[in-house]
Every structure is written in C-alpha cells, then in structure tokens.
Image (cartoon, rainbow, N blue to C red):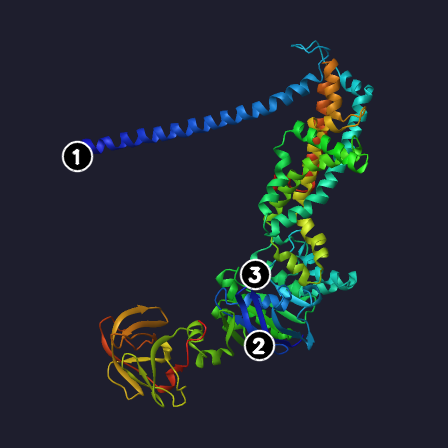
Amino acid sequence: MARLELSGITKSYGDFRAVSDVDLDIAEGELVVLLGPSGCGKTTTLRMIAGFVAPTAGEIRLGGAEITRRPPWKRNTGLVFQSYALFPHLTVAQNVAFGLKMRDVGAGAIDAKVAEALRLVRLEGLEARLPRELSGGQQQRVALARALVIEPDILLLDEPLSNLDAKLRHEVRVEIRELQKKLGLTTVMVTHDQEEALTMADRLVVMSNGRVQQVGTQRELYERPANTFVAGFVGRTNFVRGRIGAPGLFVSDSGLAIRCRDDAPAGGRVLALRPERLTLSAAPEPDANCFPATIEFASYLGGVLEYHVRLTPQDRIMVQAPNKLADAAHAAGDRLHLHWPSEASLVLADDGDG
Amino acid sequence: MPRAAGQMPTTLSARRGLLFDTRVTGRAALVAAAAFGYGIILTPIFFVCWLSFFANEIVTFPPRGYTLRWFAHIFDQNNFVSGFLTSLQVGVAAMIGGLVLGVPASLVLARRNFPGREAINTLLVMPLVVPGVVAGTAIYVFQIEVELATELPLLGSRAGLILAHIMITIPWTVRLLTASLAGFDRSIEEAAQSLGATPLQAFVRITLPVIKPGVVAAALFSFIISFGNLEMTLFLVAPGETTLPIAILQYLQWRIDPTIAAVSLLQIALIGAGMLVADRYVKLTRVL
C-alpha cells in the first residue's frame, strides 16, 4: 500500500479539457471517492492513475515514485471495472491467478494465494466455474479477488457497484469498505452515486467540468459546501439569490432580510438552505429568521413529510419535516410560519463550475 | 336487447375461427416455403451422393445396381491424387497466409477510426465481387509484368498461386474476424494489462482465445474457398500441374462416369468433417 499524489494533472483532447489541473494527496490506507455527474472527468482521472490515459500535463507519484509515464503493466494497481471485465474463457481460479502468473509466481504459491483471495471474498468452492456461470454479485467478487491477489500498491474501483441490483449494492458497499479497512488498502473509487460515495469514503472529491470543486469529508461537504454545485450535488438544497447587506445579514433579490453567520463571505451571492434545517410552525417563533409562509404542495413520504412553501412571489422553498407521531401533517393552503437559525443560512461565494 | 345478447357469442366464435384459420395456414405456408428452400439446396447434393454409387457407367435411371468401384477408380487416376495434394497444400498455405494478414487488418478495422477506413474495408471485400475469370486474367497479366520487370519466376509458381488464393480468402477472414471483434469488451484487455500483462501478452493470452471461434471460422472458410476455387486457378497453375477442381474439369471433358460424383462426395465429406471437428472445439454458430 502506498500514498498517491496527483499534482496539476490535466488531460486535453484538442481544445476540450477533460481534466483540468487536479491536485490530490491520498494517504496510505485511505479510501477517496471521486464523485460527479457523467462527463465530469472522474473516470479520465482514474484511467490516468491506472496508466491507460497519458496526462497532458502534471505528475503522478505512487509511494514516492514518479509513475506519470509508466505503462499500466508496470504500475502494480488493482483495477475493478464497472463491467467486471472477467476473462470469459478462464475459470474463477484462473482469472484470479492471472496477475500472479504475469509476475512469475511459482505454481504452489499461486494456488495458496488464489485460495486465500477467494476465501477473502467468500467464493470458496466456485474455483472451477466460468464467469458466465456466476451471478452478478459473484462476478464482482471475482473481479475484486483478482485485483487484490497481486497485493497492489493501490486499489482502483471504477463504478464497481452500478451493475448490481439495489439490495445487493447496499450489502456489497459495506463489505468492500470493511475489506478495504481490514487490509489497509489505499483506494480510489469513482462513482456518480452520492449515497454510495457517502457510505464508503474517508474523503470525497467532488468534480464537475474536469475540475475539482471541493475535497473534504462527508460532513465538510454537506455543512460547508464550497459553491452552489457542491451544495446542489451533495444532498438537496434551496437556493435564494441576493447579496450581503451587512455582516450577518443576507438580502435576497426579492427583498427578504435573512440572518446568517457573521463570517459569511462578503461577496456571497447565493444563499443555500437545507430543507431539513427549516421548521414550520403555526405561530411565529423567536428564531433568527421567521417568515410567514403558505404551503402550496405537500407530499407524504413515510419517514419524512415534504412541503413546498411560498415565502414571496419569487421564493418557493422546499421543507422536510420528520414524520413524528404527535404532529399533524399540514395541507396545501395552510398559512404557517417558516423559521430557521442563522447557522442554517449557508452563504456561498459563487456558482462554481456547475 | 335479448336478440343482441344472443348474437354476441356467434360473432365472437366466428371471429375466433377466422383467427385460428389464418394462423394454421400461415404456419403451413412457412413450412412449405422452408421445405422448398431446403429442397432446392439439398437435392443436388443428394443426387451427387446417390449417383456416386451407381453401377452404370453412363448415368441412367433407375440404376442397374450399386457399386463402390468409382471410389477405387479415383485412386487409380494420378490426376486426382496429385490434384488433391496440390489443393490441400495451397489451401492450407492460403489459410495460414490469410490469417496472418487478416487478423491484424481486422484488429485495425474494428478498433481504430481513421480516414479511409471505409474505403479499405470495401477494398478488402472486393475480391468477393470480382468474377474468378476476371481476377485470374488480371493476376496472370500482373504476374507477367512483374516477372518481366524483376525477373522473379512468379508466373506458374506455387508462390504466385498461393498469393492469389490468399487474396480471395481475405474477404472472408476480415468479415468473420471484424464480426467477432465487434462484440469484444476491450476492458478485459485493460484488466489483463493492469494485472501485469504487456499488450502482446494480453493479446495472446486473452484476446486471441476469446475470439477463437471467429479465427477458426475464418480459417475453415479460407480453406474451403481456396480448396474449391477453379476459375482463377485455371489461369495461374503451371503447365502440367493440377488442383482437384481442375482435375475434375479435365476428367469431365472426356468421361462422364460417376467417378466425378464419387470425388465430389469425398470432398463434401472432408469439408463436412472439418466443420464438425471445428464445431466440437468452438461453437461456429456463434459467428456464422
């Protein structure tokens, strides 16, 4: 296992910049997720780490060694593909043994290591099967065992769960995460699935238009998004446009004076409000922010009640309330009050590269 | 009202009857068409096989009796034996040559996008649409010119014949191989490389085994096309040399006894056996 450093990594195709100036420092044993919509450059970044795409500029270091121009077969990376990419003509055991054969490991040692790897992913007894005789989940485990058995310096996962059905996906992501922690594997995973990323990552890298928008833990991204792209991509958010009128005061374009934290950036143009941080009440409350509100649309989602609430002709806000036993659900047309503390007002400097 | 209610079932059942009838006649028509098609294809083969056992020297119906002597007769004819050996050698050489050229060509055509790709694709299939006589004449003239210019003894040489045969096998090799490469998931090559295989090792250990059905089919078809070629070959063999199809033609000029049918039966059996053996190792139905 090794530390991975990317500095100034850029990939251009003609005039198109697929990846722009990406800096990343991934510690030994850390699992970092590259998260973003399709076309954001996350897969290209992963393929540059694996060696299948040559960066136009920048440097990649693995365990301190410069590997920017090193071909894939000399990098010692364990790669798990979205399609699993198992060798269809080889058995499970032969698939797992392939990397060891390429490393000229002796036959006896290969058998022992293959058995160990298959035990690790709980596939004992399927050694002689062909990939097409396995379920999707089993194929995924073979792909993982094949990548792990070579004891890679870094494990790379390219949307490893997106071909599994929903129930299996929930199990497997916990399983992979536990295995990764147990073995202390430095891991980079690519996904567009927010929940998957939040479940598995030590740190997340949110990407858009080939640029890193923000790097941070789940909490940092959610509580302190760097821009509207991150705020909108991680979790759900209401956006209100306006400007900072005075320290601790945001004035919306529609004229609402909204209390926010005193240290909000002076150039802030957008206010982000998380729907579960807002509260509806029948009577006005002595909160930092409290505005009369009319419910226009109400949804009953089981654990959560969701309301679309009108504050001004320009501002419609989405609110989520926990479905508690004592509370009565509101209905469209109800006239209420919407309130929230100033800490719930996230003022964002700019729109980011969304 | 009661009358209307009473009419309903009648109309319904009448409709159902009509529907049923159409379905039956439709299926009957399909079976008839299929039988007709198979008949057209298989009748000549059936008669060739049957005729080869006729006792009469001049074929008449019904046969006077049955015999195996035409098969024995084949092996008394030196022309047939040497023609068969020549065809076999040329066929195997054309098959190998066709694969050596066809595999790389197909890889490039299936995987790279470059200007002129379609033109090359069409060019490689051209030998299929050029009549054998035309191709034979053209290559004959070409070989004369080359021999005059370079003094290489190309005309009437075995090498010249094999080169021409490679040319007519290329359309088949390229078509069959590009078809099997089209469904090939390239990420398995990348997986092999990430596991430490060089591109060459990945190709030999992964790509080639996976496209094996396509390669075997291409080899088989190359051999069959070369083995059965008559028109083009007529122009290119050395004086006194024969391939099996030429030997058959020459025999037919003077005799019409069932020996020809016996030779044909052996040829059908040989190629059929080749296909059956190949099919045991790779499922040809997946590529053909």
According to the picture, the residue beneath numbered tag 1 turns out to be: B1
Q: Amino acid at mark 2?
A: Asp
- Residue A121 in view, yes or no: no
Question: CB under 8 Å between callouts 2 and 3?
Answer: no
The residue at 63%/56% (across/down) is B188
Q: Are marks 2 and 1 on the same chain?
A: no
* Chain of the residue on which disc 2 is drawn: A
Q: Amino acid at mark 3?
A: Gln
According to the picture, the residue beneath numbered tag 2 turns out to be: A23
Q: Position of residue A304 (x, y in %)?
A: 36, 72
Discs 1/3, front: 3
- Residue A353 in view, yes or no: yes
The residue at 78%/23% (across/down) is B80
Q: Position of residue B74 (x, y in %)?
A: 78, 20
Residue A304 or A315: which is nearer the viewer? A315
Quadrant into which the N terminus of chain B falls: top left
Discs 2/1, front: 2
Name the element at disc 1.
loop
Say left or right for A58 vs B250: left
Quick one: label 2, few (<14), some, or many (20+) residues within 10 Å? some
